[in-house]
Image (spheres, rainbow, N blue to C red):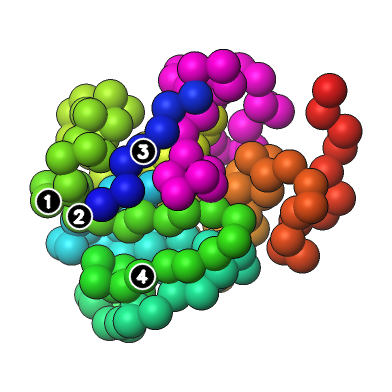
């Protein structure tokens, strides 16, 4: 297993302000296989996680290829009373390849040892979903608002794409707009 690399010379504060609904992390830049590490922690029984996995899959697929991802339909019952069926992509046994980013999607309660300290740091109450964007940004909880969840999926995927793009230096992939100069 490839180890996470922590780059103390690149603190989270050296990156642009986080995109909407994300928070600035308090650590240093994290890479895996020499690329920014994008980490998703979820649980299989969480409706918000199911929704977030779909947006995460869509966003990360703009930067590379998923193999062995499986689609499932689940019933959701949100705290606001909204219920229905939704599909999600099971990424637990899937593999991702990209020249731009390294992605790991994992169940929070069975995450490999090297990822557990990050989950504990950014989710001290063991809440999910948690997305960590290379130690620069994070979000605890879903971007789903509870109203018309499927209609908001594309907005969430765009928001996640924007966060990933802000981590990449030129040459950037087609999914990203041209980068402003960072000196």
Is residue 86 shown in magenta? Answer: no
Q: Are marks 2 and 3 in contact (CB under 8 Å)?
A: no
According to the picture, the residue beneath numbered tag 1 turns out to be 110
Secondary element type, mark 4: strand
Decide if residue 107 is on the left or right side of residue 64: left
Per the model, the C-alpha gap separating discs 1 and 2 is 6 Å
* Label 4: how many Cα within 10 Å (few below 14, some 14–19, many 20+): some
Per the model, the C-alpha gap separating discs 1 and 4 is 17 Å
Secondary element type, mark 3: loop
According to the picture, the residue beneath numbered tag 2 turns out to be 107
According to the picture, the residue beneath numbered tag 3 turns out to be 4
Per the model, the C-alpha gap separating discs 4 and 2 is 14 Å
Decide if residue 144 is on the left or right side of residue 16: left
* Label 3: how many Cα within 10 Å (few below 14, some 14–19, many 20+): some
Q: Quadrant of the C terminus?
A: top right
Q: Earlier in the sequence, mark 1 or mark 4?
A: 4
Q: Are marks 1 and 2 in contact (CB under 8 Å)?
A: yes
Decide if residue 113 is on the left or right side of residue 22: left
According to the picture, the residue beneath numbered tag 4 turns out to be 95
């Amino acid at each position: 297993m490839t180890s996470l690399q922590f780059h103390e010379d690149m603190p989270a504060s050296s990156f642009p302000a986080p995109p909407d609904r994300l928070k600035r992390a308090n650590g240093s830049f994290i890479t895996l296989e020499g690329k920014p590490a994008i980490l998703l922690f979820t649980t299989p029984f969480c409706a918000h996680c199911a929704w977030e996995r779909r947006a995460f899959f869509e966003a990360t697929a703009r930067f590379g290829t998923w193999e062995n991802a499986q689609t499932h339909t689940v019933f959701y019952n949100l705290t606001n009373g909204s219920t229905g069926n939704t599909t999600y992509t099971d990424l637990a046994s899937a593999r991702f390849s990209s020249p731009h980013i390294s992605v790991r999607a994992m169940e929070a309660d069975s995450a490999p040892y090297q990822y557990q300290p990050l989950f504990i740091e950014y989710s001290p109450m063991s809440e999910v979903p948690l997305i960590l964007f290379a130690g620069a940004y994070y979000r605890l909880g879903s971007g789903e608002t509870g109203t018309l969840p499927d209609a908001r999926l594309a907005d969430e995927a765009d928001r996640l794409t924007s966060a990933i793009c802000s981590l990449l230096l030129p040459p950037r992939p087609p999914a990203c707009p041209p980068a402003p100069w960072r000196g």
